Image (spheres, helix red, strand yellow):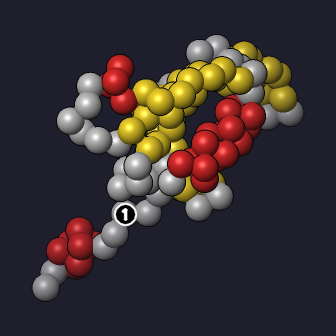
Amino acid sequence: MSEKAVENKEEKKFFTYRGYPLVRNGDMIYYGNMYDNTVVMLQIAEKTKKTTSVGELEFAGKVRLYQMKTDPKLNPVEAVIKQSERDTLFDAIDMAYVWLTRTN
């Protein structure tokens, strides 16, 4: 078996926070396992620029959270169970963790 075939068979690893995977696509972050009952979609609504010792960086400001059912038969509007908004990304991920641990 070639090295490429072995590499393709290896399981892809995701960055995790408190045991749940985090997957980012632009300004959207999906938190949770797709094989569980629900996941949380975090949408970065505002960004702020701050000057740091390494230069100017962009930070997430307001973040919208949507807890969604993972059933592929539902349309996205029907899949949303809860929604909220937080002022920082950390607060949003922390809230998402609470939602996931309560429902999954």
Which residue matches tag 1? Answer: 12
Q: Is residue 17 visible?
A: yes
The spot of residue 52 in percent (x, y) is 84, 29
Residue at image position (17%, 74%) is 5
Residue at image position (34%, 24%) is 78
Q: Is residue 17 left or right of residue 20?
A: right
The spot of residue 61 in percent (x, y) is 71, 20
Location of the N terminus by quadrant is bottom left
Quarter holding residue 95: top right
Q: Is residue 24 visible?
A: no
Quarter holding residue 55: top right
In the rendered image, the vertical position of residue 8 relative to residue 41, given as above or below: below
The spot of residue 26 in percent (x, y) is 46, 28
Q: Is residue 104 left or right of residue 94?
A: left
Which amino acid, by three-letter code, is at mark 1? Lys
In the rendered image, the vertical position of residue 35 relative to residue 55, given as above or below: below
